[in-house]
Amino acid sequence: MENVQNGDYFIVKALDHGVQVIGLTRGQDTRFHHTEKLDKGEVIIAQFTDHTSAVKIRGKAEIMTKHGKIESGI
Ligand code: TRP
C-alpha cells in the first residue's frame, strides 16, 4: 500500500517511565525505523503512514485506536 494520506491515528499514553513506541516499516522488509521514548504521563498522537505499517509498544501504556482501548505491559 502506498500514499497512505489518511492513515489511522492512534494514541499512546505512557503509564510508566521509559515506554517505547516503535515504528515498523511498511512493505517486504519489516524492521524498526523509529523508537520514541515516553515518560510517565506523556502522550503521543501518531499515524500509520507510507513508512509505518505497524507499531510495537514496550512497557506499560494505554493505547487508543478506532478499534478500542487496550493496555500494554500488564
Ligand atoms: N516518519 C515516520 C512516518 O511518517 C513517523 C511516524 C509516524 C512514526 N507514525 C509513527 C514513528 C509511529 C513511530 C511510530 O512513518
Image (cartoon, grey):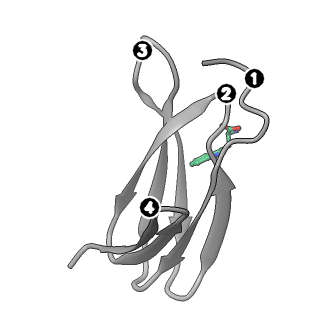
Who comes first in sequence, dot 2 or dot 4?
Answer: 4
- The kind of residue tagged 4 is Gln
- Percent position of residue 14, x then y: 48, 79
Q: Nearer the viewer, residue 61 or 64?
A: 64
- The kind of residue tagged 3 is Asp
For marks 1 and 3, give the CA distance.
17 Å
- Looking at the rendered structure, the secondary structure element under dot 3 is loop
* Left or right of residue 65: residue 73: left
Would you say the beta carbon of the disc 2 residue lies within 8 angstroms of ligand 1?
Answer: yes
Who comes first in sequence, dot 4 or dot 1?
Answer: 1
Total labels drawn: 4
| Residue that label 1 marks | 3
Who comes first in sequence, dot 1 or dot 3?
Answer: 1
Q: Residue furthest right?
A: 5
* Left or right of residue 5: residue 51: left
Q: Residues within 10 Å of mark 3 (few under 14, many from 20)?
A: few
| Residue that label 4 marks | 20
| Residue that label 3 marks | 29
User: Which circle, 2 or 4, is nearer the viewer?
Assistant: 2
